[in-house]
Image (cartoon, grey):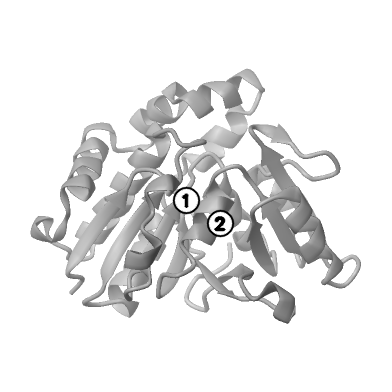
Amino acid sequence: MITKVHVVLRKEDIDETALADGKVAVVFDILLATSSITAALAAGARSVVPVYSAAEAEEVGRRLPDGGYELAGESEGRTITGFHPPTPLFLQTVCPGKTVILSTTNGTVALRKAMKARAVYAASLLNSPAVGEHICRAHQNETIIVICSGSSGRFCLEDFYGAGYFVHCLIEQGITAAELSDSAMAAWLFYRQYGGEGKAKEVLSSSRVGRWMAACGLEKEIDYINRHGALSVIPKLEPGPFGPEMRDMAQMKATREGKRQ
C-alpha cells in the first residue's frame, strides 16, 4: 500500500527536489483549472496543455495544426484577450476533438511546477474517486503529494476541501489514517466536517474565489464543479509533441482507464 500521503497547501510550497525523488503528485485547483481540465477531457478534448502564460500558450499554438487547438485562460481572474474563458461548462462547448492550451494564474502553474514528480495527475471534486482508485492500484508503496494550487500565494479554502475529499477517496480504497501526514489528516478532518455536495456548496461559495465567481454570474459553474464523483476521467501529464525547443512542455491526457463521459 501507499506509505504516506501529504498535502501541500500552496503551489509556492512545492519542493521540486523532493518530488523528483519518485513521488506521485496530484494537483488541485478546484476553482478553476483542474476542474476545467477534467471537464474538457471528459467532453472529448484530445489533450489539455498547461502553460505559464499567454505568450507561452500562443507559442505552443504555433506548433500545432491550424484548427486543431483552442486557447483558453485567465490572468488574475480576467479572461485573457483573444482566449476562451477557462470555465468547465464553456470549454465543453469548444473542446471536442481539439487540444486545449490552458493558461491560468494558479492551477496550470502548479501542474508545471510538479513536473519533476514520477507521475502527475489533475484532480477535482468531479473525478477524485476515479483518480484515487487508479493511484491506489497503479502506485502502491509510493508517496503521494496532494498539491493545493492556492491563489497568488494565498491559501485557498476550496482546494483544501478538495484535498480532503481526495484523501477520503484514498481511505475508501484502503489507505489508513496512520499513513497520513498531519496536513493530510487536517484536510480529511475538514472534509468530514463539510463533506457532501450540500455542505460543500457552502465551502465553495464562501471561499474568496467562490465569492468572486458568484459576483461574476458564474454560479452555474460552481454548481457543476460541486458534482462529487460525477466523472471518471483521469487526467495524467504526458510528454507533448512540441519539438526539442520545448522539452519542458507536457500535456494532460485521459488515461486509458478513465472513461470519457
**Horizontally, is 38 left or right of 205 in the view?**
right
The residue carrying pointer 2 sits among few (fewer than 14), some (14 to 19) or many (20 or more) residues within 10 Å by Cα, namely many
The residue carrying pointer 1 sits among few (fewer than 14), some (14 to 19) or many (20 or more) residues within 10 Å by Cα, namely many
**Residue 102 in picture, x, y percent from top left:** 68, 53
Nearest the viewer among 112 and 190 is: 112
To which quarter of the image does residue 123 belong?
Answer: bottom left
Nearest the viewer among 107 and 68 is: 107
Residue type at mark 1 is Leu
Q: Earlier in the sequence, mark 1 or mark 2?
A: 2
**Residue under label 1:** 126
**Horizontally, is 123 left or right of 170 in the view?**
right
Question: Please, is residue 239 above or below residue 28 in the view?
Answer: below
**Residue 135 in picture, x, y percent from top left:** 34, 70
Q: Note whether residue 118 is visible.
A: yes
**Residue under label 2:** 38
The structure residue drawn at horizontal position 29% and vertical position 38%, both measured from the top left corner, is 195
To which quarter of the image does residue 74 belong?
Answer: top right
